[in-house]
Amino acid sequence: MRTKGLLGCAALMTLVVGLGWLLAVGRVQAHCDTMDGPVVKTAQAALGKGDVTPVLKWVKPEQEAEIREAFKKTLAVRTLSPEAKDLADKYFFETLVRLHRAGEGAPYTGLQPAGTVEPVIAASDNALETGSVDGLTQEIVKLVSNGIHRRFAEAMEKKKHADENVAAGREFVNAYVEFVHYIERLHDDAAGQTEQHAEAQKPSEPGGHQH
């Protein structure tokens, strides 16, 4: 096990700013499914201007031709009537999101309504839109600090009784492992080591860090 000291306030701030806020891939991808997510917002603006270029960044090069064709058809149909516009736009949104998710190796399960984005993800988008990460950083610092303190307190409490009997000892070990691994995950995410560390912990590979 790699030994890590407790994170000081300055180290914690640095850690959190560089953190992806521990967002699982699935959550980020689900964000791109929503009607108020960045993919659909880009598509809405592109349709309004009649220029497909801005949406192409959301798909792989090999998907570009399909998006260009869908965009062309959408522009032609959406001028027929308000109803046709709504249907055509939705068709394009669904096509774009489906291809985007396919490019990320994720299944497409349909467009999600606006307002379903998790607050922390919405805050991340807002930081990029406003050009300031201060509010987001403060919120994440608070959440991470609470997570560290809670696990630390539980481990310390269990440690007091760890030698009373085997069951109590095992409870301490469980709390200890949870505390240390939480710190380790935070550190590795901040240092950009998540993928490398995950590889090193594969059970099939000897020498991986496991408890």
Image (cartoon, helix red, strand yellow):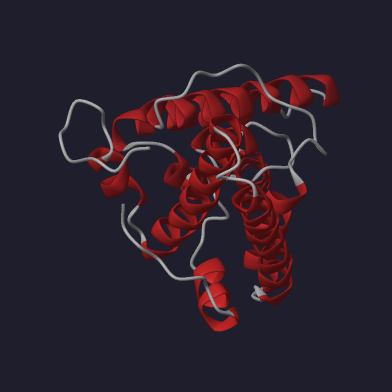
Which residue occupies the extreme front position in the image? 164
**Foreground of the two, 211 or 13:** 211
Q: Residue at x 42, y 24 (%)?
A: 102
Residue 82 coordinates in the image, percent (x, y): 84, 26
Q: Position of residue 91 (x, y in %)?
A: 64, 21
Rendered position, 185 above or below 128: above
Tell me if 196 is positioned left or right of 43 in this view. left
Residue 172 x %, y %: 57, 43
Which residue is rendered at x = 51% and y = 70% of the image?
6
Q: Quadrant of the C terminus?
A: top left
Residue in the foreground of this view, choosing between 207 and 140: 207
Which residue is nearer to you in this view: 10 or 130?
10
Q: Is residue 199 above or below residue 181?
A: above
Residue lying at 29% horizontally and 30% vertically, measured from the top left: 62
Left or right, residue 88 beside residue 194 = right
In the rendered image, which quarter is residue 165 located in?
top right
The picture places residue 156, in percent across and down from the top left corner, at 63, 57
